[in-house]
Image (cartoon, rainbow, N blue to C red):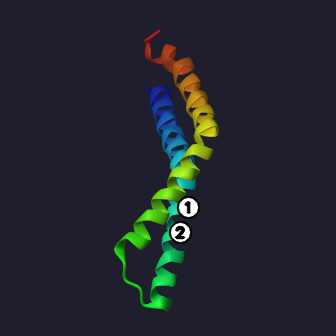
Amino acid sequence: MQNLDLIITDLARELFMTALMLAGPMLIAGLLVGLAVSLFQALTSIQEQTLSLVPKMLVVGIVAILMLAPGLGLLTEYAHRVLERMSTFGLS
């Protein structure tokens, strides 16, 4: 039973790390663009709400498209690791 708990904990840790690696680049890009736009708005006293939304949407969309192939690779590797360990749970 102890071994099963370790496997489940390891899979959960890998799941969180995979999710962080998938979402991280988009979140960081959105954060940086939001910070830059906020700084620009503060310096120019322009308080247009769409000025902050549209650039973030564009940058996050572009980063998502650029990260599509590596992200699918990460998901495939994680799925293989999970499926390899299914025999431990008696599901194969």
Q: Is residue 49 left or right of residue 28?
A: left
Vertical comparison of 21 with 32: above or below: above
Q: Are the residues tagged 2 and 1 within 8 Å (C-beta)? A: yes
Q: Nearer the viewer, residue 39 or 12?
A: 39
Query: According to the image, label 1 marks what residue?
Result: 29
Residue 79 higher or lower than 43, as above or below = above
The CA distance from mark 2 to mark 1 is 6 Å
Amino acid type of the residue tagged 2 in the rendering: Val
How many marks overall?
Answer: 2
Residue at image location 54% in from the left, 58% down from the top: 59
Q: Circle 2 — which element? A: helix
Disc sitting over residue 73 in the figure: none
Q: Which residue is mark 2?
A: 33
The picture places residue 45, in percent across and down from the top left corner, at: 42, 90
The foreground one among 36 and 79 is 36
Check disc 1 and report its element: helix, strand or loop: helix
Residue at the image position 56 percent from the left and 61 percent from the top: 29
User: Would you identify the image quadrant in which residue 28 lies?
Assistant: bottom right
